[in-house]
Image (cartoon, helix red, strand yellow):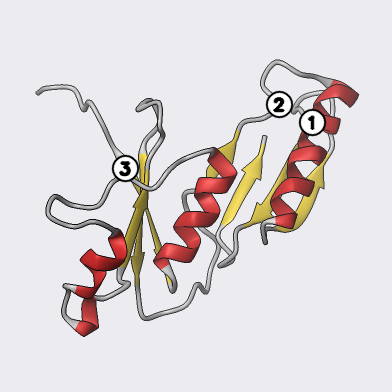
Amino acid sequence: MSPIKQFQVTFDCAEPERVARFWCEVLGYVVPPPPPGFASWDEFNRSLPPEDQGSAFACVDPSGVGPRLFFQRVPEGKVVKNRVHLDVRVGTGLVGDERLAALEAECARLVALGAVHVQTMVADGFNESCIAMQDIEGNEFCVD
């Protein structure tokens, strides 16, 4: 069996482009170029049947290291907690007050983008601090 070389993380959502652009801002990701033969994603989108227009969007790590994020429109809304979530790693290597300050600064930046602060979990001697949040459609993620 050959090892997996790449993977993408897929989000079910109501507004794929809006959620993708939010995550571009969170992670420093970019929207990839449109398919060959199209000058823009809008042009590509207009070429699709009406029922498929706006049904998907993606963003990528410009360095090519991180996974591709794919956003697909689904008819149902979010009703339960995610079983998988992203951890936005901004406090790696930091501890105590220095870590908490870095997490809180990132939390404030993300709230300004439309994220929701859910809970700050302060270091307890075993686990370091982290902040639970929700993206613009209520998907849980952590600032870690």
State the image coordinates of residue 18 (x, y, percent, origin top left): 48, 65
On the rendered structure, is 132 left or right of 12? right
Label 1 neighbour load within 10 Å: few <14, some 14-19, many 20+? some
Query: Which residue shows up at 43% across the image and 43% down it?
Result: 30
The answer to whether the residues at label 2 and label 1 have Cβ atoms under 8 Å apart is yes
Q: Amino acid at mark 1?
A: Ala
State the image coordinates of residue 119 (x, y, percent, origin top left): 78, 52
The answer to whether the residues at label 2 and label 3 have Cβ atoms under 8 Å apart is no
What secondary structure is found at the residue carrying circle 2?
loop
Q: CA distance from mark 2 to mark 1?
A: 6 Å
On the rendered structure, is 17 left or right of 110? left
Judging by the rendered image, the residue that carries numbered circle 2 is: 91
Q: CA distance from mark 2 to mark 3?
A: 24 Å
On the rendered structure, is 133 left or right of 58? right
State the image coordinates of residue 1 (x, y, percent, origin top left): 9, 23
The residue at the far left in this view is: 1
Q: Quadrant of the C terminus?
A: top right
The residue at the far bottom in this view is: 50
Say which label, 3 or 1, has the lower sequence index: 3
What secondary structure is found at the residue carrying circle 3?
strand
Q: Camera-side residue: 12 or 38?
A: 38
Residue 25 in the image: above or below residue 63: below
Label 2 neighbour load within 10 Å: few <14, some 14-19, many 20+? some
Q: Camera-side residue: 126 or 90?
A: 90
Q: Amino acid at mark 3?
A: Gln
Judging by the rendered image, the residue that carries numbered circle 3 is: 8
Please tell me in which quadrant of the rendered image residue 105 appears.
Answer: top right
Query: Which residue shows up at 52% across the image and 43% down it?
Result: 86
Judging by the rendered image, the residue that carries numbered circle 1 is: 102
Q: Amino acid at mark 2?
A: Gly
Residue 142 shows in the view? yes
The answer to whether the residues at label 3 and label 1 have Cβ atoms under 8 Å apart is no
